[in-house]
Amino acid sequence: MALRGIKVVELAGLAPAPYAGMILSDFGARVIRVDRTKPMIVMDRLCRGKQSIALNWKKPQGLDVLRKLCLSADVVIEPFRPGVMEKMGLGPDLLTKENPRLIYARMTGFGQSGVYKNMAGHDINYLATSGVLSQLGRKGERPDPPINLLGDFAGGGMVCALGICMALLERVNSGKGQVVDANMVEGSAYISSFTFMLAGMGLFDNEKGTNLLDGGAHFYDTYKTSDGKYMAVGAIEPQFYKALIEGLQLPADELPSQMDMSTWPDMRERLAKVFSTKSREEWTRVFDGTDACVTPIMTRDEAPGHPHNQENGSFLINEIGHPEPVPAPRLSRTWELPRLAHPVVGEHTPEILAELGYKEDEVRHLQELGAVVSAGEAPSKL
């Protein structure tokens, strides 16, 4: 696998940092998640193929283990606000002095600098600050947050993983690591470069929900079918629009010009009435195999069963019987299905401590102090 031999230490967090770690794990890296020792409900499901060590960071002995673990790694991923790692004596300046090859990835919402750097926030706040959220939604309605995919995962975890991979590649030539400052404000803005860079060119110049690609055009929208399901329409180019009109059996010679924006609202109503006359399955049969750019909108539960996804093996079934997407992109020589096992908190504590050079009696002493915990072990009350 592409990242085999790379050791990653991921400090446990939520959403973007675990996703970055999962990407690296999916492509072969050994990812060790550093969990806390206190009992908790573990919300992280983005942990397939990872290992877990449970440390009590409030104990100096636990911090010492964490420091040794970080110094043994190729990559550290930390998800905290600026200054947290420095207060623990584990900031990048100190660790990279001892391990110059270390790549230190910092995954935050607002970044390491700026007036918002110490503020709490979530995906919706980062999108709001980036200028992206204002572009999402229907005309005349409030901005509509798209779950937490754009900030946390696309602009957060994915961008962080990309930065780590670029730093790993650069290290081949320089022999040196570096700090990867990934934050969701800049990441989500960067993901949205298309809308910023095309400003003034006619595609995104009007109020949200009235432009070519944001639901303003009747030929780039979704439509409800007679059975309460939906079809997606993306017939932008003239030849594709022609195929759409033919499939809908509308009289092409009586319709306005496709790009006459003044007619888009009326045409949307007309298309909505036509789509409401057949079920999703009936419309799928009409448009499958054509270039009309019309496809059924599959639910999350339906998508793994779609013939296209089944043929490609685009989803796999995890250990609890639920579908998960396979890693993307596929590499021709070094792509494999991911390791599906999800670690229990502290499952690999003894193994990892042994690798760091701790002897059995030293491990027992750390456990007695409450500095480390193994899976199924009650944390110390000390």
Image (cartoon, rainbow, N blue to C red):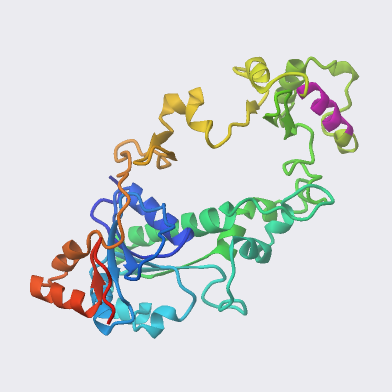
Q: Can residue 175 be seen from the camera position used here?
A: no
Task: Identify the residue at horizontal 64%, vertical 61% (top origin).
Answer: 124
With respect to residue 61, does 129 lie above or below?
above
Task: Identify the residue at horizontal 33%, vertical 52% (top origin).
Answer: 25
**Direction from residue 246 to residue 37 in the image, left or right:** left
With respect to residue 302, does 107 lie above or below?
below
Q: Tell whether position 268 is magenta.
A: yes
Figure quadrant of the N terminus: top left
**Direction from residue 297 to residue 141 in the image, left or right:** right
The quadrant holding residue 275 is top right
Q: Can residue 49 be seen from the camera position used here?
A: yes
Task: Identify the residue at horizontal 32%, vertical 66% (top origin).
Answer: 34
The quadrant holding residue 104 is bottom left
With respect to residue 250, does 327 lie above or below?
below
User: Residue 286, image x and y in percent?
Assistant: 67, 15
Figure quadrant of the C terminus: bottom left
Q: Tell whether position 175 is magenta.
A: no
**Direction from residue 317 to residue 118 in the image, left or right:** right
In this picture, which residue range is highlighted in magenta? 266-275
User: Residue 345, image x and y in percent?
Assistant: 31, 61
The quadrant holding residue 254 is top right
Is residue 11 or residue 35 the one in the foreground? 35
User: Residue 61, image x and y in percent?
Assistant: 24, 81
**Direction from residue 362 to residue 99 in the image, left or right:** right
Is residue 329 or residue 278 the one in the foreground? 278
